[in-house]
Image (tube, rainbow, N blue to C red):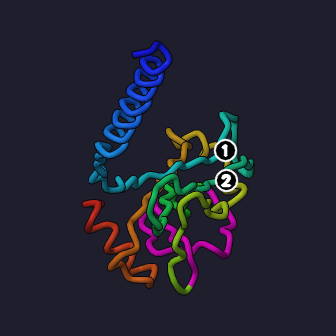
């Protein structure tokens, strides 16, 4: 046998072997995958801001207060704001104008509850904010002697939220449902 024939035989053998290996690799391909079984988490929370600053206030004096609720949840919600303020023999210590996007649903001895909406509740969408309940509060006019007899002139603003599913669009009924669900007295 000549050397050339041996080389051609070896080259042919290598080519045939490579072809067989490539064919074997490509015909023996396999893959696998899995899909997770995740479900979306429900987040139900909001941010309440009031822009209240520490300041001195006396009879007839005013201060800025802008209660706003930002829906930081994944769900729509109905919003309520409670304003607790001291009372005098003449009524509540502060007066304020309320934006027409809010409606009072309860008024009891210095505690006033407002619903976000007018004739019907307004659903606050995720990422949206309410209109400010008010811009400014003013202490009523009174004598310095009456003013001196009041121990605490502070107000407290509390926000409440309830999911909209199965909740009445009537503001007073929605507040009753919120109180029941939240065990609010």
Furthest-top residue in this view: 3
Task: Find residue 10 and report its horizontal and vertical position in percent.
Answer: 41, 21
Which residue carries the number 2 mark?
A: 66
Image quadrant of residue 70? bottom right
> Going by the image, does 11 lie left or right of 178?
right
Disc 1 element: loop
Callout count: 2
Front residue (pair 176, 145)? 176
Residue at the far front in the pictured view:
1
Q: State the predominant SS element of the stretch in magenta.
A: strand
Q: Is residue 36 above or below residue 119?
A: above
Residue 178: x percent and y percent? 34, 68
Going by the image, does 114 lie left or right of 185?
right
Residue 51: image tag: 1
Residue 142: give x, y in percent of width and height. Answer: 66, 53
Whole-percent x and y of residue 36? 29, 50
Q: Are marks 2 and 1 in contact (CB under 8 Å)?
A: yes
Residue sitting at 31 percent across and 66 percent down?
Answer: 179
123 magenta-colored: no
Q: Residues within 10 Å of mark 2 (few under 14, many from 20)?
A: some
The disc placed on residue 119 is none
Residue range corresponding to the magenta coloring: 94-118
Point 46% across, 69% down: residue = 78
């Amino acid at each position: 046998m000549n050397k050339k024939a041996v080389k051609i035989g070896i080259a042919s053998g290598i080519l045939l072997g490579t072809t067989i290996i490539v064919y074997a690799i490509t015909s023996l391909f396999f893959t696998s995958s899995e899909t997770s079984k995740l479900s979306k988490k429900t987040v139900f929370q909001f941010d309440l801001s009031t822009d209240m600053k520490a300041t001195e206030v006396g009879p007839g004096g005013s201060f800025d207060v802008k209660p706003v609720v930002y829906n930081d949840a994944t769900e729509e919600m109905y919003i309520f704001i409670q304003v607790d303020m001291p009372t005098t023999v003449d009524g509540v210590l502060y007066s304020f104008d309320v934006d027409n996007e809010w409606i009072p649903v309860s008024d009891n001895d210095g505690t006033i509850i407002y619903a976000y909406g007018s004739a019907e509740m307004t659903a606050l969408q995720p990422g949206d904010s309410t209109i400010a309940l008010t811009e400014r509060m003013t202490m009523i006019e009174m004598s310095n002697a009456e003013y001196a007899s009041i121990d605490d002139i502070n107000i407290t603003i509390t926000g409440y939220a309830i999911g909209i599913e199965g909740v009445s669009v009537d503001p007073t009924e929605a507040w009753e449902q919120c109180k029941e669900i939240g065990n609010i007295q």
